[in-house]
Amino acid sequence: MPKDGGIGASTKRREDNRFLTGNGRYTDDINLRGQAYVHFLRSDVAHGRIKGIDTSAAEAMPGVIRIFTAADFSAAGGLPCGWQVTDRFGQPMQEPKHPILAEGKVRHVGDPICGIVAETLEQARDAAEAIEVDIEELPAVIDMAKALEDGSVKVHDDLTSNLCYDWGFVEENREAVDEAFARAAHVVSVDLVNNRLCANPMETRVAIGDYDPWNDQHTLYTTSQNPHVIRLLMGAFVLSLPEHKLRVVAPDVGGGFGSKIYHYAEEAFCTQAAKWLKRPVKWASTRSEAFLSDAHARDHISRIELALDADHNFTAIRSTTLANMGAYLSTFAPSIPTWLHGTLMAGPYKTPLVYVNVRAVFTNTVAVDAYRGAGRPEATFQLERVIDQAARELGVDPVELRRKNFIKPDQFPYQTPVALEYDSGNFDATLDKALQLSDYANIDKRVAEAASRGKLRGIGMSQYIEACGIAPSNLVGQLGARAGLYETATVRVNATGSISVLTGCHSHGQGHETSFPQIVADMIGIDASQIDLVHGDTANTPMGMGTYGSRSIAVGGSALVKATNKIIDKAKKIAAHLLEASPEDIELKDGKFSVAGTDKSVEWAAVTLAAYVPHNYPLEDLEPGLEETSFYDPNNFTFPSGCYICEVEVDPETGKVDIVNFTAADDFGVVINPMIVEGQVHGGLAQGIGQAMTENCVYDENGQLLSGSFMDYTMPRADDVPSFTVDHSQFTHCTHNPLGAKGCGEAGAIGSPPAVVNAVIDAMHRGGLTHVRHIDMPVTPSRVWAAMQN
Amino acid sequence: MYAFDFVKPSSLDEAVAALADEGAQPLSGGQTLLASMKQRLNAPEKLVSLRAIPELQGVRREGDTLVVGAATTHARVTTEAAADYPGLAALAGQIGDPAVRNLGTIGGSLANNDPSACYPAAVLGSGATVATNRRKIAADDFFAGMFTTVLEEGEIITAVHFPIPQRAAYAKFQQPASRFALTAAYVAQFADGVRVAITGASEGGVFRWSEAEAALSADFRPEAVAGLKAPAEGMIGDLHGTPEYRAHLVGVMTRRAVAAAR
């Protein structure tokens, strides 16, 4: 083990020194010489036809440089969608244009109409108020079911309907699943809503466009989780800029949770306007704008049905969902309710038949896309709710019903009926661990004690499996992805032995600057302080696909292992030359190369110096220098799994739910930095509990966002969550990547919502309120109270 | 935020004179006004800060009355009223978060009369008197509906005179996002009877629940109001609670306030 931590060490996060002292350098901290400011005039109606835009008075106002409308961007492409879903009839999804500025129609409150560039932000905002936009308001389409009715108003006039796609998976199993339900001894179903959310990272989005006319070089500084993806999408599809003329920089980024994956209109606007105006152009979202322009999340209405035989074996699952796309297709939106959702509908269970139908719908609301978990929380919520309901209706223990249907440890690799092949897992082990840590066996005593205080206490569990570490490029290509999903690493060893690791991943809270060096330190045996991570700038990192889907360690870390192995192989050859031995006899341990079976050795730094000062060097056989790059394309997803147990107390007078205990027993495979992993679980749990208990993004029937500020959108706060019990001791190795790591970023948000709701329903039943079958998320006091009354 | 002029007078007379200008508005803690200005929903031409006027500051006892200067922050009331009027101090300590409590003032809260604010419940529930630069206004006459009071142009609240009850308490059920009162009850027992004020619930703003007052004046125990139900009609319905839920909470919070009163 290296001095300051290799793989498995809870090294303190080095990046926190700057974050916690206010010395992070975020996009909004960047101010360029001559910078102008853009303010976007956004639609205040959900749906309308633009009859005219009069900017003449505004253009004459102090400080106004230029006002842009859609007409200025007629040569630009629309914002591209990165995933094409094919429907169950073999046809491609309906794919509307997503213009940079609204063309002809506005389609949601917040749709940008004009970009006003001025010397100061206040001048731009003043000018916006002087612009006269003549909009003929049209009826808004908000409700998904109504949007699909014949004769509904269409969000996009050039599409045949508001249906984006009608997807069936596995379509060939549709009839077999129906037959299994017809034969079933028991059928249980739950109708449920997966509530719409706003990601709300602490840092709102910011973009700065800059243009150097002497070198014809564009630079975009932006709050992104994946600068290379933005360069590719914006360069190739929107502004027709080749990669070598476009640099995208994502410096410190204050949280993303998925909402900063996508290419947004403001990025393209600032990049292009900077060229036209020959000045840097900056945009910084207000929190109010973020609610109206950041991609929203979830928003599914589902029916989940479970068929069981007389022995309570699961025989089939049928899931039917309406998924809200919003007004436009955000970058990865179509993939979320399909390939990231339907493929998880087998869960950790050996159900032989599964059929998932998803109809994706356009509405006059902000676009919906991935958010921590992305599709997998929706699948897990359906499964774990219907299984709990089945246990209740059949009068059996929900723990044992799950255990009976688990895929068992000796059945891996396990081919599910929904395309995935799980490589490893041990669901009984995480279940047992969670039962033990939560003192599940003694719940009755605690229920009785709570009852003596007038509280209804209940316990609920959730057993999840998810697919992350995305993804095998050839597979996702077949499924409609328009990008590869490999990851890259360059290991640049400097002459004196220090190392710069360059990655295509991006750290915006994940602690990569600490954990990535731990991998290299462990492999070479030098101090991690000798290693730095470079990320976030397309100018100095190899092309990678960024950070989302819990992929960075599993995919980016694996690329780093590959590159480091190349370094070690070459360094051994240099060491062999210096030690006058054969490379096969060289061993590397604790940063020292030695000849096996002898006391001859040479230090790491002496070898690296020889590589760059090659006076005594096998120049005829080996190039000087020590720098290697690897691209790693995984050959499968990774499959974290685990068991979450939530214990609640409900105040029967007010309906208020308090989470009194929460236990998370996860199988993340090999863990690089346990402290960081625990922090990731805490964050995921807080967001999952937020979805379950507090957060709700709500539109009225006219398409006005009712939850458009923190006065009404309830972010979970510290006092909404308990002190978590987190364990990751029950791990199985990922069998197909060199680290054995599975990923941990999203698990908390995936596994926790059903555990919370199951616990609340359990509390109702234990309290004698047996009529309460389901309560939709968020389980707010008023909803719980209302459910108790009926 | 639009451009505006800013003055910070050091006497009440100077403040009154400054407020006579067209487009002038008083600024106290600014916890509502500044946020609305940042959203360009409010555009005063001049802000007259009331924070540097000594006679508007502080908490002092005058016989059976506790006098709170209008520009006294919630944080000061939390600590300085604790010995003389613990029910009031506890209410002030539940407003917002520490940042809000260190800037927000009682006068600002009352003049704004947000239907979900905490202070109006204490003022109405205590039967306090609102003193201004022109007159003294009984709490029963002061509040005139959601975001409305009887204050006139140029009239500045200078202090609030709280008769100190035998016992009192505030029971607040928080709106989960804003943490204003979704519904809250302030109950105060005096020698001549009990007052019950409800905030957060009604479309008309803070109100006295007279049925509960009568029941508690006869028998100051939670059980005395257990059978009472506030009507849902006229209650606020929004994302966080239906009118029926708020009406239900009126009863729950009143009982809890009675149980907590000391």
Image (tube, coloured by chain):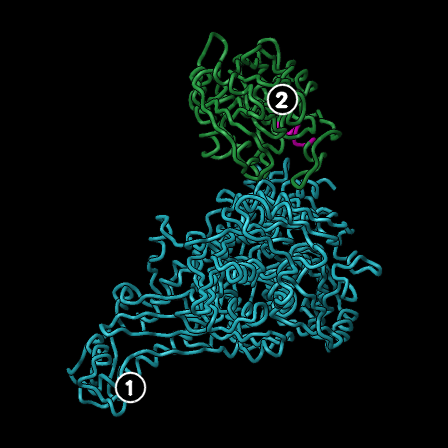
Mark 1 Cα-neighbour bin, 10 Å: few <14, some 14–19, many ≥20: few
Check the rendered structure and report the hue given to chain A: cyan
Report the magenta residues as a range.
B247-253
Circle 2 sits in a helix, a strand or a loop, which is it?
A: strand
**Taking A588 as reference, is A461 left or right?**
right
Q: Tell me: residue A24, above or below residue A629.
A: above
Extreme residue in the right direction: A151
Quarter of the rendering occupied by the C terminus of chain A: top right
Q: CA distance from mark 2 to mark 1?
A: 84 Å
Residue mark closest to the camera, 2 vs 1: 1
Q: Are marks 2 and 1 on the same chain?
A: no
User: Which residue is located at x 32 percent, y 74 percent?
Assistant: A492
Tell me the subunit letter for badge 2. Answer: B
What amino acid type should be assigned to the residue bearing mark 2? Answer: Ala
Determine if residue B258 is in view: no
The label on residue B197 is 2
- Residue A283 pos. (x, y %): 52, 53
- Along the line of sight, which residue is nearer the eye, A477 or A424? A477
Quarter of the rendering occupied by the N terminus of chain A: bottom left
Residue picked out by circle 1 = A623
User: Which residue is located at x 42 percent, y 66 percent?
Assistant: A537
- Residue A381 pos. (x, y %): 63, 59
